[in-house]
Amino acid sequence: MNINQKIASVLLTSRLRQLMVAVLSVTFGISMYVFMNSFMAGVNNQQTEITFTSMAHIKIYNDLSDEVKPIMPVPADTHTVIMVNNARNIRYTEGIKNADGIKEQLSTHDEITGITAQLNQNVFLRNGVSKISAMLSGVETISEDQVFKTSEYLVEGDLQDLDKRSDGIILGISLAKGIGVHTGDNVAVITSDGISKSFKVVGLLETGASAADKTKAIVSIQTARQLFSKNKSYATEILVNIKDYALAQKIAGQLSSLTRYKVEPWQEGNSQLDSANVLRDIIAIAVSLTILIVAGFGIYNIMNMTVNEKIKEIAILKAMGFNGKDVIEIFLTQSVVIGLMGGLTGLVLGRIIVSIVDNIPFKIATLTTLPVEYRTSDYLMAFCFGIIITFLAGYLPARKASKIDPVDILRG
Amino acid sequence: MTALSVHQINKYFHEPVNFHVLKDISFEVTKGEFVAIIGKSGSGKSTLLYLLSTMDTDYGGSIAINGTQVTGLKQNQLAKFRNEHIGFVFQFHFLLPEFSVLDNVMLPALKLKKKGKEEIEHEALELLSMLGLNGQEHKRASRISGGQQQRVAIARALINGPAIIMGDEPTGNLDSKNTKIVFDIFRRLAKERGQTIIAVTHDDEFAANCDRIIELSDGVLI
Ligand SMILES: Nc1ncnc2c1ncn2[C@@H]1O[C@H](COP(=O)(O)OP(=O)(O)OP(=O)(O)O)[C@@H](O)[C@H]1O
Ligand SMILES: [Mg+2]
């Protein structure tokens, strides 16, 4: 410990009550920062998770091209007029014919964590007289589970059962209620072509996203292909999950060069989800920074008072040969120590608050407790901001102290 | 050799009214000389000493200490110069109240960093015992008597072995026995180590025993 630090520590410990108030204000600021950001991250994660139970990061499908090709070449001479009324954009191919080939091709990309193919069609479900429209999803059970974690949202039954019996079907929980069937009951699926087939309900799905819970019906993809009489490798879409969903746009760009089908990142058409996440993050940062800045004013105030109280001591030190820089060091050391002590206790307190919140019951949708995230980066950022703010708050009074003219004070 | 050379010093106070405190002061002090400054209360003795100690830089004229022209140096340079070359005892004792007696004495030496902590502590203890302060070393500076505080301030002024020791009534609060002790210490430092002593005093006997007396009257040297 050098002489300036020693002086700082003596000055700091001579007023323990003030020291404690200053430390506590930092503690409070930092713990709030940690709490706010952990909580918001938890909410964001929860939202994203629900979103991605029914939506993959990237979707590949056969898009109807929006540019209508001219039916006849435009004539070179100006005397001929072509009149085509009501031109139709005809889709010659429907869906993806060789889904397996594309899946294999994509699997070489190392950002990809899961690929699954789906065959989706609108159908009607009928149980006796009640009839309801539904979205029938033919899925590859194993990779489907990797991408959507579907089995986590099954309240009854098992996803693998779909492979075991070709007439098995899993229904969204509200859908099942809507037509009054339970696990074990039979239900008829009627396609738009009028084909009807009877299925046995083997499970129920509850994702928390009501649109999915109200419409979704899952069968195995082979069953779906049979039902719609499609070839072996047919799918309507290929769904891809990647390591970091925020990068979906970039990776979709890379993938689109591998296939002639439309490659669509999740943000396209879901910007409301994206913007909600960003807005929540902004609120969290704004609120927590405000708290930290208020704590900074607290420190500024206390350090200012200390400088005024110790003005005579500062004059003596300067008279003995301590220069302006030494005085700045002495007072800055005090605020940095306050920052460090408040910062560390703030991190601990923040961690405690977060785990308390993590255990507060909150039974809505699939939640059981309030959602929080444990991210090291939140703690690091809180600590850095805390130190920066105490440093700034301490610097101004310290600079004022360094400018004190000793004669003015000592002449009395 | 000249320890201190003062040339044509003029000092004004502007608050509350314009006031010419020191008028055309010039004098020299040789190394190892023990000088007393006397004069009526309000004649400008303290003001002069603040100028000589380099703390007050707002004056006309020039001051050189040990051959270094201190007039015109920057604040930080002056701080370093004071730390190394000047020991100062204030009219009111001005210790750091939160620190122990020993720490108060050691601070200027710890700042100078010429010696190790052990050595500094040893020298500080020696100075304190020389000034009759045995047993007070670890008390807080605010918990000792006025006379004791004044002697601690003297010990602090001596710790770096400064070329010039300036005292503003350094024995003002001491009984005759302790005044004698301080006087003898100053005497010995001047004679044995060639340190220059400049002391403001109201004590005629103290002044009479010095090498030279400088008298101020209403800001003029007589
Ligand atoms: N800060 C100041 N502002 C204005 N005038 C001052 C200031 N300090 C001192 N003076 C005036 O300058 C004159 C000299 O003051 P100084 O303190 O030098 O006297 P002194 O000789 O040390 O007296 P004493 O023996 O009582 O200590 C006095 O008339 C005093 O009123
Ligand atoms: Mg005086």
Image (cartoon, coloured by chain):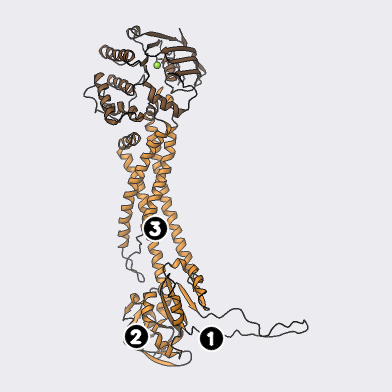
Say which residue label 1 marks.
A93
Say which residue label 3 marks.
A37
Measured along the vertical axis of the image, is residue B174 above or below residue A78?
above
Q: The brown chain is which one?
A: B
The subunit carrying tag 1 is A
Q: Do labels 2 and 3 share a chain?
A: yes
Image coords of residue A245 (percent x, y): 44, 68
Image coords of residue A358 (percent x, y): 32, 62
Q: Does the residue labelled 3 lie within 8 Å of ligand 1?
A: no
Measured along the vertical axis of the image, is residue A327 above or below residue B24?
below
Judged from this view, the residue extending furthest toward the left is B135
Amino acid type indicated by mark 3? Asn
Which sits in the foreground, A129 or A7? A7
Mark 1, other Cα within 10 Å: few <14 / some 14–19 / many ≥20: few
Q: The orange chain is which one?
A: A
Q: Do labels 1 and 2 share a chain?
A: yes
Q: Does the residue labelled 1 lie within 8 Å of ligand 1?
A: no
Amino acid type indicated by mark 2? Asp
Disc 2 from disc 3: Cα separation: 43 Å
Say which residue label 2 marks.
A163
Mark 2, other Cα within 10 Å: few <14 / some 14–19 / many ≥20: some
Quadrant location of the C terminus of chain B?
A: top left
Disc 1 from disc 2: Cα separation: 28 Å
Q: What element carries label 1?
A: loop
- Closest to the camera, between mark 1 and mark 3, is 1
Image coords of residue B100 (percent x, y): 27, 29
Measured along the vertical axis of the image, is residue A402 above or below residue B153?
below
Image coords of residue B88 (percent x, y): 37, 21
Quadrant of residue B1 within the rendered picture = top left
Disc 1 from disc 3: Cα separation: 48 Å
Q: Which residue is drawn at 26% across and 30% down?
A: B118
